[in-house]
Amino acid sequence: MHLDVQDLKTFYYRTQLGRAAQKAIREKVLQIWPEAQGQTIVGFGFAVPLLRPYLPTARRVVGLMPAPQGVMAWPMGLPNVSVLCEEALWPLATGMVDKLIMLHGLETSEHPTEVLDECSRVLGPGGRVLFVVPNRAGLWARSDQTPFGFGRPYSLSQMEKQLKRHGFHLTRHEVALFQPPSHKKVWLRTAAFCERVGQRISNRYAGGVLLVEATKQTFQPTGTEIRDQLADPIRILEGIAKPARKPATLVVTSP
């Protein structure tokens, strides 16, 4: 089930561990998507900490928060862009989204199939989605001191199989959060060092979260194009012989 929005807000904005996690994940997101100039970018779950860098340049930024989780106003000091929505019924037009980020939206959902179907619906041609999920092989999925210790953790192969079933093509993956999921100061002071070393060692197994980028597959028709030829109604009677006119005969009758 989804975590409460107040617990997520407290972790990401009021704890050192949460701020360090936010920084590490956001840097990876910006490495994958450095800009969103003139685009519509949407976050689902509790993705708003990752959306702030796109506010100045994106055409539209929307933070969707599922009803079981709750909603908070965001961003602080600016017009609100957060929207409370049903988990699998988003108030977005079909095909309007260029980039979609999911954080704490898939692994905690009780209806992941419907959520992925909704992702596919709102993405436009060439649209991309970035899933940030707990890494089954990492330490963060095994600790309940962070939001990543709740819900279903994923391996890369599990994500790939699930996305393929919903018409997505995996294009890239990264990992983040190599520091231990601990609030102890000794580990917090070494967060940046752990992240640098971890990125050099592994891009798949050791990190606490997986960042999986995918695109919606569009199938092009194949084979020889066949068009049904319809007769032109104006010319449909062409070729029919016109009836021959018989010469008029004069009939004379005697009185």
Image: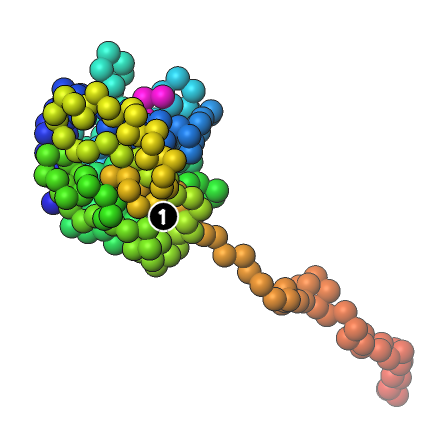
Q: How is the image coloured?
A: rainbow
Is residue 67 in view?
Answer: no
Label 1 CA crowd tier, 10 Å (few <14, some 14–19, many 20+): many
| Residue 9 lies in quadrant | top left
Residue 134: x and y, percent?
23, 43
Disc 1 residue type (three-letter): Ser
Counting labels gives 1
- Residue 113 in the image: state x and y as whole percent: 25, 54
Task: Classify residue 213 by image quadrant.
Answer: top left
Residue segment shown in magenta: 49-53
Q: Quadrant of the N terminus?
A: top left
Viewer-proximal residue among 173 and 164: 173
Q: In the image, is residue 11 above or below residue 209? A: above
Q: Is residue 89 left or right of residue 183?
A: right
Pick the front one: 37 or 172: 172
Q: From the viewer's perspective, is residue 170 above or below residue 91?
A: below
Q: As drawn, which residue projects farthest toward the top?
A: 77
Residue that appears at 21% across and 20% down: 189
SS at mark 1 in the image: helix
Q: Tell me, yes or no, whether the highlighted magenta stretch contains residue 96.
A: no
Residue found at x 42% / y 41%: 128
Residue designated by label 1? 120
Residue 160 versus residue 71: which sits nearer the camera? 160
Looking at the picture, tell me which residue is in the foreground, 53 or 197: 197
| Percent of width and height locating residue 202 | 36, 41
Which residue corresponds to the image point at 27% horizontal and 34% vertical from the top-left?
Answer: 178
- Magenta region, main secondary structure: helix
Residue shown at 10% from the left, 29% from the top: 7
| Residue 81 location, quadrant | top left
Residue 221 shows up from this direction:
yes
Say if 240 sits above or below 114 in the image.
below
Residue 214, image x, y percentages: 40, 45
